Amino acid sequence: MTASYAVVAKPPSSPHGTPVGLLKELAVTLDGLGQILDAALDALTVGETELALNSLGPKDRQAIMRGLGFRKVEPRRFGRVLSEQVLKRLQRVEPTHHRHALSHLTARIMNDIDHEVAEHGAAGTSPGLVGRWGACLLRLALFSHLQASAHDARLLVWAAEHDWFGMEADEAALAAVLKAAQQVIDATPGFDHLTALGEDAAAEEPQPTAAVSAPRLPDHISAPELAESSAQQGEQPPGEGRSLDDLASAEEELKHVVEEARGAVDRVRAALLDGCPPTHTDLVPLAAVAPAFSHVRGVLSELGVTGVTDRLTDVLRSIDEVRARVERKERNAEARQVVETVTALGCAPDSAVAAVIADARHSAEALLAKQEWDEQDDACAHILTLLVRLADMKDRSDAQQEIIELQQQLSVAHPPYAVAAVLYQQITLSEHRTPHPDTAAAPQGEESAEVPEAPERAISPETATAAQADTGVPETQDLSTADCVPAERPPRSADTAEQQPAPERRVFAAPAATAAVDTTTETADGTETKSIEPVLARLIAEKRFGLAAHLSQAADRPDTEAAVLRLAAAATLLHSRTGRAAQIIEEALHEWEARKESDSDALSLLLLPTLVRGALVTGAPVVGAQLRALTPQLPDALHEVATMVAERALQGALLIAPPHAVVADVSHTEGELRAAVDACQAMLTVPRMRFQRASAMVQRWLAPTGLLGSVLTAIVAGAPDAEHLADELLENLARRAQVEAAIDEMDAALRGPGGRGIQGSGRNNVRHCLDRVRDAVRQWRTVKRDLEAGRSEENVWAFQSIASLRLSLLGLRERVADDLTAAERSSAVLAKATAYVARDLFAEIFDGLDANSRPVETGSEPDVQTVLDAELHKAESAVPGEKPTLDGLLKAVDRTWDDAIERLLARDEFGVIRTITDLADFDVLPAAHTLSLSEERRARLSAIQKERRAALAEKHRQLAAWLRRSQADEALTVEQDVSLQELLADARAHLEHDRPGELAAVRRNLDRVEELLPRYREEAADRLRARLAALTDVSAEDRERVLRNLDTDSLATAAELVYFLELGEPVPEIRSEDSHLEAFFPAVPDSLPGGIDADLIAAVRARGRYGDRAVLDYAGLSEEEAERAAAALKLWSTLAATKDRININPRESLNPALALLGYEARRARPLDDLPRGKDYRFFELAPVHVTGRAWAPAFGSQVKDRGGKLRALLIWGRPAAKLLITRALQDPDESSLLVVHFGTLDSRTRNELAAASQDTKPIMVVDDAALAYLIAHGNRRVDATTETLLPFSAVNPYIKEKRGQIGREMFYGRDRERKSIHDPAGTQILYGGRGLGKSALLADAGDRFEEQRPGAYRKLYLNLDKIGIGRGTALGAEAIWPTLDQELIRQGVLEEPRRRGPQQESWQRVTDGIARWLAQDPDRRLLILLDECDRFFEADVPECTETRRLRGLGEDSRGRAKVVFAGLHSVQRFTRLARNGPFSHLAQTPTVVGPLAPQFAADLIVHPMRALGFEFADVDLVNRVLGFCSYQPFLLQIFGSRMVQVMQDKRARAPLAPPPYTIEDSDVDAVEQDTSLRSDITAAFKDTLALDDRYHVIANVLAQHARDNGLETRLSDRELREECAGWWPRGFEYLDSEGFRAYLQEMVGLGVLAPNNDGQGWHLRGPNALRMIGTAQEIEARLLRAETESRLEETVVLESRPDLYDGRSAPLTVNQIDYLLGEYVNQVRVVLGTQATGVADVERTLREVTGRVAGWSVPAIGSAKTFRKELAAGRAGERRLLISDLSLGSEKSCRESFDLARAVLPDAAEATRSVVLVSGVEQLGFWSGLLTGPDADHDTIMVLRRHDLRSLKDWTQRHSLCETEERLMRLAKATGGWPYLLDKALHLRDRRPDQDRVLADLTSWLGQSSGAEQFVDAVGLLENDTLKAAYDGVVEQLGTDWHDDAYLVTAAEMAGLSSGEACRAVVCLEALQVVDRDGTRLRVEPVLHTALGVLEAKV
């Protein structure tokens, strides 16, 4: 028996000498396994077949496809359908041929198996193989390639170890196979198949290598046999066409080989980098590259192309050029023969196509006369080819479909030939024609394609195939065309030819006959309406009804025509009576207007089948009615059809018994019912929607009890009332208005009060959900009704009637066809087309009535409107978003879907593309033949969409970042910001929802943002330029800086600079200084490669220069210094050279050198517990005194904090940088380490050291070079040492978090505040916002205080928050004393208390102890610093006992002991508001700790960076950082810390780059984008605002104003207060104007507001303050919540009036006094008051207050001359107050003094004064001008006021009078809060201590005419007749009730005053305090009204 497995005993499968007998035995045992391949092939699935096919290279694809009989089917990728066909043919192949076919199918798989065996050996496992290919394919691969050889024996043994090898074979047979295989293996030890394969390949000539190795052929099939087999299977003979095939195969092979080689190169490189040899399997692909290139060059050479370089892109370009040239010549040759046929065309002389034939002949002759054709000629030839083919088809009755396709193509390609397309039967074709003489002259180069001899018929099969490829018509299975390659369709350029005709070119023109048919009219755009009829006819013939309807409407043709076309389109989609198509048809017919007969005559044949189909499917009577109306226009059979169907529809029979129900059986209907129930169940799943409220609405509706869910649940559950519920739902949602009402009702239930209704996309989502549920319920109800109707006896008549109708209609089929065929002979193009398409539509109707046809589909329908509008996507609108024009629609007629999709791709219209592909999948896409939608193209579209989405997402990210920067820059107005945010938010939502249709909208939004943002930024820049131009007193340098920032788009920095210039504050400067780093590096290390030597020591001692290096010149040293330095260097050199490094004494030999660096240590202790070696050792230096200011706390103040200890590492041997760091890190202590490196670190090592030190502890390395340099330039200070050496370390001097400990080195500014703290007479109150540096200031002040006189000066710092003192807690304010006692004992100020004897109270013990300690030494001083005092003060008010005692420490010791209180804003307020407090007003002016001054802030960020070796690229970057951090010190610290990290990372990435390193824009960007930093900055700012809710409201009101009107616009005190009161009335109703101004001043100090020095109003401090407050939406939201969420601090609103020396209260509140005095500003204030409000005490009050504080100058003003003189006097720094009491003077003197005070300023520079003018009732005219005149300035005026209930309560507590609630109310009623009456009450109390009697006496006194008269005179109302008249008018008209301002003005007018007088009078009455105000309402003051009544009664 002959074995079926070939025996191979030679290389490469077996080594030489392999025993053939063993191989034969192996073959026999393999046969014993049975038909393994057949069994595996039967188990092969379609998916596995597809996987295997798509893995093949071109050669294997060709072999298997042609071997199986597939002709010309060589797809780039196999789909499921084609794979299924391949599998079926494989399984039908003779079993003897299975192995050959399967060997090609599994070629790639077998290669993978070989690779796996070679790489892992027999012991390897292959889970990847099984996962990739599956067990079945692996078995097929193995056994289809299996032979009896040494290599295959090894494969068998290897495969037997894997599960996929398992098969249904006898175990004994399998064991025999394995045994035989093992014997072969044993007989061929050491055999390597790959090595043998390589040797075999090397022995042969190089051959082209395929991308996938060719399958191993069985030995019994030789290569010649395979070639012969392939030839027999239909392969083309050699030639140019075959060369093109070879070229394509070679191209694919080359691509694959290169790709494989690239992967192999990566694996080879990885192996070599790992120190391993590459595997042979990786070298084989590399060896295949050169042969592959050689093979391609050979094929190109055959085609005449030489000189192509071995570069893939060049080779592929040459291949494309060759292919294009050859294919073009082939097409031209074929086309010439067809064009020659045109000359033989003819027709009858009177035929309508005569003009077309004449034009075609003329065009053909012109083409044949040309030697070369261009693209326009190709298009012309294509048109002529279509005409010839159509003429050749007139006798072929069996080719109707092909004729229709040709007619459509010809009409599309050249509309003037549409007549010939329709009347093609009138064209004749001569059988005998003479070839055109020019045909032979056509150019035929040696590379031109062979042109086959033309057959007898004019149209060659090749040309037919080409035309079919053009239209997408399936190729007919004809032997003559089966093997033809479809030619590429030539580009259509007919339109171009018509628009731009060349003079010498023959252009197709419309035949004259066509143009002269009728008179035409023009539309609005000039298009002739008659000329579009051929186009309409063509569209109708092609069933493109939607585009035809739009075209008809655009051409202003009759409305009926467009309506019929829309109905026809809907009818083609009509499948069930419940679908959307049925609804559209019924609604359209209900709305059908009366129409003229002529309007519908032309389309009556199209309307007929539309209505018939509509009636049969829907059964609607309205369809029957319209059908009956149509019957008079119809011929015989058509008339009968219309009559019968209309009759059944009007009878209702079609509603009861639909034809499909009559045709289909009950089981089919029940199946439809089940499908409808399933659809309803699917509707119960709540869909995910983009809008939250839309989702909530749908969720409620779909709930089991909801509007929709109840019905759907009943249907699914089969509830008895399901039909009733469904009918009710359908009735309630039948109309669009009902749907909208349901949506509105649910929306109103869900949205909050004042919320906006759901609109836009959200409403559409809800609407679509309702429509889907309604359609599902309607479908179920219809099927249910049909099923029940069929079972009802009452409906038998209907079923019988419809059955009769069906038979009658089927009987009329032939006659209907004859009628329509006759109608096709019409000469009217439109009528002919409608007849043609009506015949097709009726054929579909009759097929649906045929019992043998499949039932009508009732599944889901595509959206009708989408289908109608589908081809609009081909048209281009003149204006985006508008409907296409007529011209655009005409262009859309000829545009293919392929072209349209490419255009849509360019605009990212993936949603439209998805719609097109979906319609194509539904098979409802108009003109679908122009769309090629292969799997490859779908994949390409998906890939493009994915790429575009990723690109748009990246663009969105960039634009969002740009927008955030613009927001931070304050470059946008509110409207601009909101619009851009909305655009980006909408784009982001579209991107997140991953919908293809959204990308176009995303693109539009992003393009819009990209367009607007630069424009808006430029507008912002222009606004800044305008602000800058308005500033006149600006230096040219500062102006240039601003403009430079504007030019570089640094708007935030520019805005910050303009802000400073507007305030007159200095712009920070970045001073350039000599750099120790640049002088030292690399010059000194390069000059001392050998380290310190004798020459250097001699140069130091001689104060000379070392070598020629000027940097090492020691001439600046004194003789003593030089000698000390030389001695230190000598000791250093000795220590460096010592061999005994164990017994060294660093104190003697090292410390002198360290002293040169600024570190003086007394001793050095070896750290023997740490690692040590021959070349390194650790020591601890202590105590260390640091000389100078280190640039980093780690090597300065922290050394002192650690008790003066500094660790040092001594290291010898000049180790590498990484080793040095490793040695240093052996010290586990995280404190700073000084590395003493003996020898010089060269420049490269220094740079490497800087990079290697990244993320290590603070290390500073001093070497010989550094020591030599610092001797010359360091001055024995750490300043120079750290500046020289820190750039090579990883030290970060900035704090990383807000609460970090700040070293003294990093404390900048606050000099004035610090001095004031030290000064015994200086400030005792510090206040400021969180994070502004109060605690750091106290710590720094305390340290520097002790350093002034160490030992004698002591400081004590306490954080009171840690003690827990607070109101309502267990620890009251008195708990401060025990804490002080303990701390002072610890510091040695107080002695331990005695255990026996009397115990003093804590406060007394502390006070006495401090006094004793101070008395012991007159130089002693004590500074107690109390931080976080807010809660302490809260606990100590109102008596302030403990505060008074603390302050008394300073008074008792005459300033030698001083207590300083620090805290938040409330510290300042409590010091002023506390009754009889220890800080009587202005005895201690609180000192605000706000943002750093600009220069100090710049120094904080620049100087440490410079010391670390980091330099800012320019000063503008510094300003940018300062603005970003709002000059707040702790924010600058955190920013600096992050910046150091960024720069050290940057340095580590470029280790060889020398310092200094430049800080660039990108580095600052990186820090600014740090989310945690941005969060810290915003949180810090908001923490400040959170101190008081009023801060929040004020800041947000100003922020809103800034966003609306620009940051530079301001609000006055009154405007701002009114706006704030509008948002939070309760928070500001009891806050008078002075109290409000106090808040504003506090916010200035806190860094929120800009100072109002010029009196023009208030605004935020700068753009960064606005940025940190938030966006416009956040601001508005906070203001809207202010009234409900804000908390009122009662202690804040209490108004305090200081006491005068006589015990009475001052007429001014504390806030008013502050406002009058000002703070180092020039200001003028006018106090308006009467005797009743205390005007006489104003000057006294101010003088008493200022007299308590040193530094105030209040000169006496005795005359106008003195007043003028004092206005110009004063010196800088002096606080001056000028008080001029004019209350008894004239109005003229008041005006003159006022004008003089505003005009005259101090002569001395920076001198200031505050002017207070006091005016009484004698100058009411002056009041009127100030209050209501054109120059009214409310910021200048201060009105003395009565007490309100709150301030009156404070008055009662202060004077211990009427303190109960009941007495307080009686006092208020009796006095009205008038200060005059309150003073009277105090006077009465002195006489009668009984409080009740005081109130009674006061009331009695006012009831007497004398008392009433005194009081009224003090008020001053009677001093002015106008005011008295206005008052009387108000009382007469309005009484004493509350009324709005306008009512009082009207009442004053009724008293005889003019309108202007009335307004001024009411304002002055309020200033006199004779009316009360409550918001906008006023009333007369009751006490005064009663007193006036007493006087009137007397009269």
Image (tube, rainbow, N blue to C red):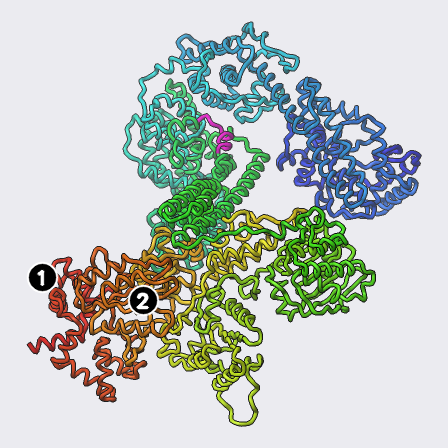
View extreme (left): residue? 1995
Specify whether 236 is left or right of 757: right
Looking at the rendered image, the quarter that the N terminus falls into is top right
Q: Is residue 1496 above or below residue 1484?
A: above
Tell me which residue sits at (31%, 38%) in the image.
591
Magenta-span inclusion, residue 1113: no
- Spot occupied by residue 1449 in the image (x, y as percentages of width and height): 46, 80
Tell me which residue sits at (47%, 9%) in the image.
362
Q: Is residue 1054 above or below residue 559?
A: below
Residue neighbourhood size for the residue with mark 2, other residues' Cα within 10 Å, grouped as few (<14), some (14–19), many (≥20) = many
First in residue order: circle 2 vs circle 1:
2
Specify whether 1468 is left or right of 1202: left
Res. 727 in view: no
Looking at the rendered image, the quarter that the C terminus falls into is bottom left
Q: Looking at the picture, which amino acid does disc 1 mark?
A: Gly
Q: Which residues are magenta?
A: 893-903
Q: Residue 1777: which disc?
A: 2
- Spot occupied by residue 1160 in the image (x, y as percentages of width and height): 67, 66
Q: How many marks?
A: 2
Q: Residue 1952: which disc?
A: 1
Q: Is residue 1762 above or below residue 1894?
A: above
- Spot occupied by residue 355 in the image (x, y as percentages of width and height): 41, 11
